[in-house]
C-alpha cells in the first residue's frame, strides 16, 4: 500500500513541478510580449496620428491653400493670402517641403502663362493702336487744314474745332493705352514752354473751360526738353481729368519754381481722398512695372498707373498727398532741372521767319478792291481798250492758302454741312485745275 502511494505522490510532485515550470515560462513569455507590444502600440498610435494629419493636410492643400493661391495669383483678388499648414507640427518636415513645391510650381505656371498672354496681348494692342493713331492724326491734320480756310467765329469753323477736340480726346485715349502696354506715347515734340504744355493738356479734357491757368511769364515761358514734353503733357492731362471729374467748380493750375526745378500745381475744390486712397495713389504713382493686361483693375481709373509709368520712365514725379486750399486734392507734378530745354536758337527762328515770308510771297493774293462781284479782276486802265473793260480769270490759288472772297457765300451755319464743305473744296480744286489747262481767256 505504501509503495503505490509513494509512486502517486512522486508522479503528482513531478506534474506540479512541470506545471510550475510551464507557468513560469508562460509568465516570462507574457512579460516579454508585453514589453515588446508597448512600443508597437505606441508606434501604431503615432502612425495613425500621422496618417490622420497627412489626410487633413492634403485636404487643406486642395480645399484651402490652392484656391487661395489661384485667387491671389490668377484672379488677382486683393487682400488674399495663401495660408500655411493646418497641422503645426508638420512644419519643416518633408511633407511641408512637398506641399511648398506644389504651390511654387502652380504659382510659376500661372506667372508664365500670364506673361505669355500679356506679351501677346500688349504686342497686338500696340499694333492696333499704331494704325488707329496714324489715321486719327491724318484726320486731325485734314480738319486743321480745313479750319485754316475759313474765318473764326462761324458755326462751320466751330464744328471743325469740335471735331478736332474729339480727335484729340481719342488720341489721348490711345496714348494712355499704349503707355500701359509698355510703349512710348507715340509722339515726339520739340522743346516747348510750360505755358504750351498746360494749354495742350487743358485742350485734351472735356471740361477744359473749368481749368483756370494762372499764367506768369517768369515760369510759363520756361522751356522743357522735347523728349519729355509729350509724357509730361499726358501726365498733366490725367491730373486735370481727375481734378475736373471729382469737382464741380474751377480747377486752378499754376507753374511754380522750386529749388530743384519747376512744378505744376493743380488744385481742385472737390472730394478729398482718405488715408487708404492716398496710400494706394502713392503706390500707383511710383510703380515701375508694366501694367498686367490680363488682370486690369477698373478701366475708368487708370490715370495714376499711366502717370506712374511715365514718371518712372522719364524722370519726373507726381504727388497727390496734399490737400488744396479749397478742400480738395492738390496734385503736384515736379519737373527737375535736368529735363529743362533751351528752345529754338536764333538761327532756327530766323529760318522759320524766312520760310513763312517766302511762303506768303510765293502765293500773292489779289486785293479785294480789285475784284468784281463774280470774283474776276477788273482792269482800271482803259487806255488800251476804248470799250468796256475786259475781265480775266485769276490764276487759282493753292487750296491751303485760299481765303474766302467777299462775294463768296457765307460758310454753312449748320455743323452738319461739314461733309458738304469738303465736297465743295474738292470741286473748287478741280475747277482750278481745269482753269490752268485752259489758260487766260477774256470774258465779257
Image: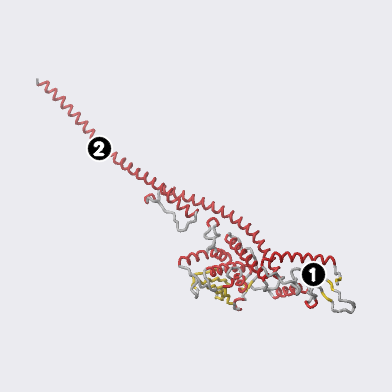
| Quadrant showing the C terminus | bottom right
* In the image, residue 429 above or below residue 33: below
* In the image, residue 185 above or below residue 322: above
Q: Residue at x 21, y 32 (%)?
A: 23
Q: Residue at x 31, y 43 (%)?
A: 42
* In the image, residue 253 above or below residue 291: below
Q: Residue at x 25, y 36 (%)?
A: 30
* Residue 161 locus on image (x, y percent): 65, 69
Residue where numbered disc 1 is placed: 396
| Res. 261 in view | no
* Residue 304 locus on image (x, y percent): 53, 65
| Quadrant showing the N terminus | top left
How many numbered marks have been drawn onto this rendered protein structure? 2
Q: Place residue 290 in its image quadrant.
A: bottom right
Viewer-proximal residue among 264 and 138: 138
Disc on res. 31: 2
Amino acid at each position: 500500500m505504501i509503495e503505490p502511494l509513494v509512486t502517486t505522490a512522486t508522479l503528482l510532485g513531478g506534474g506540479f513541478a512541470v506545471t510550475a515550470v510551464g507557468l513560469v515560462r508562460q509568465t516570462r513569455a507574457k512579460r516579454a510580449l508585453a514589453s515588446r507590444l508597448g512600443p508597437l502600440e505606441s508606434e501604431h498610435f503615432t502612425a495613425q496620428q500621422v496618417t490622420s494629419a497627412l489626410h487633413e493636410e492634403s485636404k487643406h492643400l486642395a480645399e484651402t491653400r490652392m484656391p487661395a493661391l489661384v485667387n491671389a495669383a490668377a484672379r488677382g483678388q486683393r487682400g488674399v493670402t495663401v495660408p500655411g499648414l493646418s497641422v503645426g507640427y508638420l512644419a519643416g518636415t518633408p511633407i511641408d517641403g512637398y506641399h511648398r513645391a506644389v504651390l511654387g510650381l502652380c504659382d510659376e505656371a500661372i506667372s508664365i502663362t500670364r506673361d505669355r498672354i500679356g506679351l501677346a496681348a500688349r504686342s497686338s494692342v500696340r499694333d492696333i493702336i499704331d494704325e488707329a493713331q496714324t489715321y486719327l492724326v491724318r484726320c486731325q491734320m485734314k480738319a486743321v487744314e480745313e479750319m485754316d480756310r475759313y474765318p473764326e467765329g462761324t458755326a462751320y469753323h466751330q464744328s471743325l474745332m469740335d471735331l478736332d477736340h474729339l480727335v484729340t480726346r481719342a488720341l489721348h485715349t490711345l496714348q494712355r493705352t499704349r503707355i500701359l502696354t509698355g510703349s512710348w506715347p507715340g509722339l515726339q515734340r520739340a522743346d516747348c514752354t510750360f505755358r504750351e504744355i498746360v494749354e495742350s493738356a487743358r485742350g485734351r479734357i472735356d471740361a477744359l473751360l473749368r481749368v483756370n491757368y494762372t499764367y506768369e511769364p517768369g515760369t510759363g515761358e520756361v522751356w522743357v526738353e522735347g523728349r519729355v514734353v509729350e509724357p509730361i503733357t499726358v501726365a498733366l492731362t490725367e491730373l486735370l481729368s481727375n481734378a475736373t471729374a471729382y469737382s464741380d467748380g474751377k480747377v486752378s493750375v499754376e507753374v511754380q519754381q522750386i529749388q530743384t526745378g519747376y512744378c505744376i500745381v493743380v488744385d481742385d475744390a472737390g472730394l478729398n481722398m482718405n488715408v487708404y486712397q492716398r496710400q494706394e495713389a502713392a503706390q500707383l504713382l511710383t510703380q515701375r512695372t508694366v501694367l498686367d493686361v490680363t488682370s486690369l483693375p477698373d478701366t475708368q481709373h487708370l490715370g495714376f498707373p499711366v502717370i506712374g509709368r511715365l514718371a518712372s520712365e522719364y524722370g519726373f514725379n507726381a504727388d497727390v498727398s496734399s490737400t488744396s486750399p479749397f478742400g480738395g486734392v492738390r496734385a503736384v507734378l515736379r519737373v527737375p532741372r535736368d529735363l529743362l530745354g533751351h528752345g529754338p536758337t536764333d538761327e532756327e527762328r530766323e529760318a522759320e521767319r524766312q520760310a513763312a515770308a517766302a511762303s506768303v510771297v510765293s502765293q500773292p493774293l489779289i486785293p479785294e478792291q480789285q475784284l468784281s462781284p463774280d470774283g474776276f479782276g477788273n482792269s482800271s486802265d482803259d487806255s488800251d481798250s476804248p470799250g468796256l473793260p475786259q475781265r480775266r480769270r485769276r490764276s487759282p490759288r493753292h487750296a491751303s492758302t485760299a481765303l474766302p472772297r467777299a462775294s463768296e457765300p457765307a460758310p454753312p451755319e449748320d455743323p452738319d454741312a461739314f461733309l458738304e464743305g469738303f465736297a465743295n473744296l474738292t470741286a473748287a480744286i478741280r475747277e482750278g485745275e481745269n482753269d490752268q489747262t485752259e489758260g487766260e481767256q477774256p470774258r465779257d
